[in-house]
Amino acid sequence: MKVLTKEQININVDELHTISNTDLADLCYNTEQAIKAGGGFGWITVPPREVLKKYWNGMLLINTNKLIVGRLNNDIAGSMQLSFYPSNNEAQKTIARIQSHFVAPWARGYGLAKAMIDYAVAKSKENSKNSIQLDIRETQTAAIQLFESKGFVKWGENPQYAYINGSPIKGYYYYKKI
Ligand SMILES: CC(C)(COP(=O)(O)OP(=O)(O)OC[C@H]1O[C@@H](n2cnc3c(N)ncnc32)[C@H](O)[C@@H]1OP(=O)(O)O)[C@@H](O)C(=O)NCCC(=O)NCCS
């Protein structure tokens, strides 16, 4: 596990349009660590590396998605998908969605997740969106605290949002006017 003092930290957020081999390796490694820590955006067990590589390369092919990455001293340490609705969906064309937001366990607590949310809000405004929406498992307490501290409002719950080892897990739904 890497341990860094705050003075050694340089945080940066950007958007990937292509993935270098180094960035792909970082994304796969961090996804594995996040899954093992219990927050691998849907995965419960770590899939083979090839599956993760296909997943991340596939992300770039979805033209309604922006793949936002958070870097700690230039290494990717977290990511977020910011998605917009396809152009046929006029009723929801001003709504953005945040999905699969995570920071690798070794990089948590340095403000990287907050910086990615700020970037997503700025990008959404730039693209004429007026609302951002997302959903979170009730067990993701850090993320719940984080989004509520950023002004996201909880509007609903789904008691059967996900199933872990056969047991239902509640999900919370949030929106924020921007
Ligand atoms: C939620 C997550 C992204 C936070 O990443 P991070 O880089 O550590 O967060 P930041 O340092 O930017 O922000 C810290 C804020 O998050 C919240 N937070 C972080 N860890 C927390 C914890 N253990 N308990 C409660 N709140 C916590 C607090 O609001 C904190 O703000 P504060 O420092 O002012 O109190 C990270 O813990 C994670 O990847 N979790 C698993 C995946 C997940 O839940 N994703 C969200 C799905 S939408």
Image (cartoon, rainbow, N blue to C red):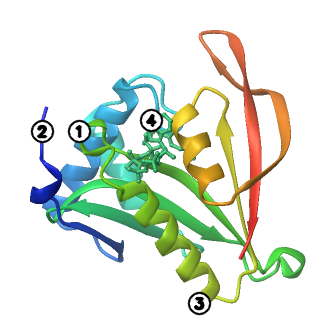
Q: Secondary structure at mark 2?
A: loop
CA gap, disc 1 and disc 3: 32 Å
In the picture as drawn, the residue positioned furthest to the front comes out as: 7
Question: Looking at mark 4, is its residue's CB closer than 8 Å to ligand 1?
Answer: yes
Q: Which numbered disc, 2 or 3, marks the residue that appears first in the sequence?
A: 2
Q: Which residue is mark 2?
A: 3
Q: Secondary structure at mark 4?
A: loop
Amino acid bearing label 1: Trp
Residue 142's disc is: none
The image quadrant of residue 48 is: top left
Q: Which residue is mark 4?
A: 40
Q: Of 150 and 33, which appears nearest the observer? A: 150
The image quadrant of residue 124 is: bottom right
Q: Are marks 2 and 1 in contact (CB under 8 Å)?
A: yes
Residue displayed at 73% across by 33% down: 171
Q: Of 43 and 12, which appears nearest the observer? A: 12
Specify few, some or many for label 4: CA neighbours under 10 Å numbering under 14, 14-19, or 20 or more.
many
Question: Looking at mark 2, is its residue's CB closer than 8 Å to ligand 1?
Answer: no
CA gap, disc 1 and disc 4: 14 Å
Residue displayed at 18% across by 50% down: 25
Specify few, some or many for label 3: CA neighbours under 10 Å numbering under 14, 14-19, or 20 or more.
few
Specify few, some or many for label 2: CA neighbours under 10 Å numbering under 14, 14-19, or 20 or more.
few
Above or below, 97 against 39 in this view is: below
CA gap, disc 2 and disc 3: 36 Å
Q: Which numbered disc, 2 or 1, marks the residue that appears first in the sequence?
A: 2
